[in-house]
Image: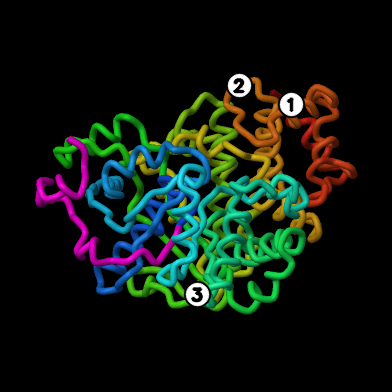
Amino acid sequence: MRLSATTLPSIPAAVTRPAYDREAQAIGIVHFGIGAFHRAHQAMFTDDAMAGGERDWAIAGVSLRSPAVHAMLAPQDGLYSVAIRGRATAETRIVGAVREVIVATHAPDRLARLLAARETRIVSLTITEKGYLRQPDGTLDLSAAAGGATVYAVLVAAFRARRAAGLPGLTIICCDNLADNGGVLDGLIRAYLDRYAPDLLPWFARECACPATMVDRIVPATREADREAAGISLGLRDEAAVVTEPFRQWVIEDRFATPRPGWERVGAQLVGDVRPYETAKLRMLNGAHSALAYCGLAAGHRYVHEAVADPRIRALVERLMRDEAACTVNPAPGQDLAAYADTLFVRFANPALPHGLAQIAMDGSQKIGQRWLEPLAINHGRGLSCPATLAALAAWIRHARGDDGHLDDPMADRLRALWAEAGRDGIAAALFGRDGLFAAAWQADDAAIEALRALLAEA
């Protein structure tokens, strides 16, 4: 039998279940991108907030196109289990914050009603970096964003409906790994409005807010073995089971246009400036993750804990994180970057959480700018060399050729074409030279180009 509201009472007492009446909670949050990360992170914070007495913050999860998550969650009435696995600890809980799941292209009218409802006050997003439809220079790809199923088109329709009904605006929270994600989202929405709905620009500026956030929790892709383990714990089949680590962090800029849940009472941090936290996460954690992914795959490893146990890879990632990335972060008062690095390596080494390197390696063209190229540019301006970051970058360049079968990237065709045109000796300049594809983020000097050529020649 499947986990559902009907079968929930039958689960073992050792499994924690929602500590509130789900049916009494109105939907207050519409979330785009109802994947495993959201279910293990923001939805759990919201679940905890409602368990603590907050009301009417249930979540409607939206998939823009794929019906896969709807097929997992809808028959389960939005319920799912989260297995929290540490090196020596394990617990399972049922999360009840998700009340409804919608596929935007299948139920556009229902989605429109939810976004236009007075009770809806927050829209949140985990649509991955590529979901924002940005060009390599970071600006909005207006032609790609014009389709009716894009998040921009859906939001603009909601803005128009709320304005017509005399309702207040929305707080729109980006929870993806974009530097200054609140400011970026605000700018992208304004660019879309300027082109397609300029009459809404003053209303958006007056009524809405896009606070910046930093999110952190390692959530590997769920495997069939994880679903089987969940079935043993629950005595029920859970198609939407999620596995994660004990650690979680959510730093949110305290700038809302609407009421909000008391997330800070259940562990979130409300701050005036998210940038030091987000920069540390992007450059230290995410930068190290990418290095582990590309170097680890090249060395024949499958999981993060295997790659970080490889002495050669571990030494490279230690140097990248501690010496080349941390020095580019301006920490907030009390933010200990050395301790943060120590914590990260403990998390990476957790064998109870098999985090696939291929999963981390996806969409590298959308990620390397913030994770590696920005630190490279900063260090170059200071006259500092970054041999570990260049070694990781060379591993990505090799990966981008697509020979190992792991390349999953929105720019895959373009990257393969550049490789075919430039060859091994010219690919570094084609990507990072004066007129390179990524030159806007970091323009490599002659020494860096030569270093990358030498590293590529070693393969």
Q: Position of residue 253 (x, y in %)?
A: 53, 73
Residue for point 41% across, 45% down: 36
Q: Position of residue 165 (x, y in %)?
A: 53, 73
| Residue at mark 1 to residue at mark 2: CA–CA distance | 13 Å
* Quarter-of-image position of residue 395: top right
Q: Is the residue marked by circle 2 packed among few (<14), some (14-19), or many (20+) residues within 10 Å? A: few
Query: What residue range appears in magenta?
Result: 1-30
Tell us which disc is closer to us: 3 or 1. Answer: 1
The disc, 3 or 1, on the residue closer to the chain's N-terminal end is: 3
Position of residue 153 in the picture relative to residue 307 (left or right):
right
Residue beneath disc 3: 334
Q: Is the residue marked by circle 1 packed among few (<14), some (14-19), or many (20+) residues within 10 Å? A: some
Residue for point 89% across, 42% down: 435
**Amino acid tagged 2:** Asp
Residue beneath disc 2: 404
Badge 3 element:
loop
Badge 1 element:
helix
Give the label on residue 416, or none: 1
**Amino acid tagged 1:** Arg
| Residue at mark 3 to residue at mark 2: CA–CA distance | 43 Å
Position of residue 3 in the picture relative to residue 149 (left or right):
left
Give the label on residue 133, or none: none
Is residue 183 shown above or below 287?
A: below
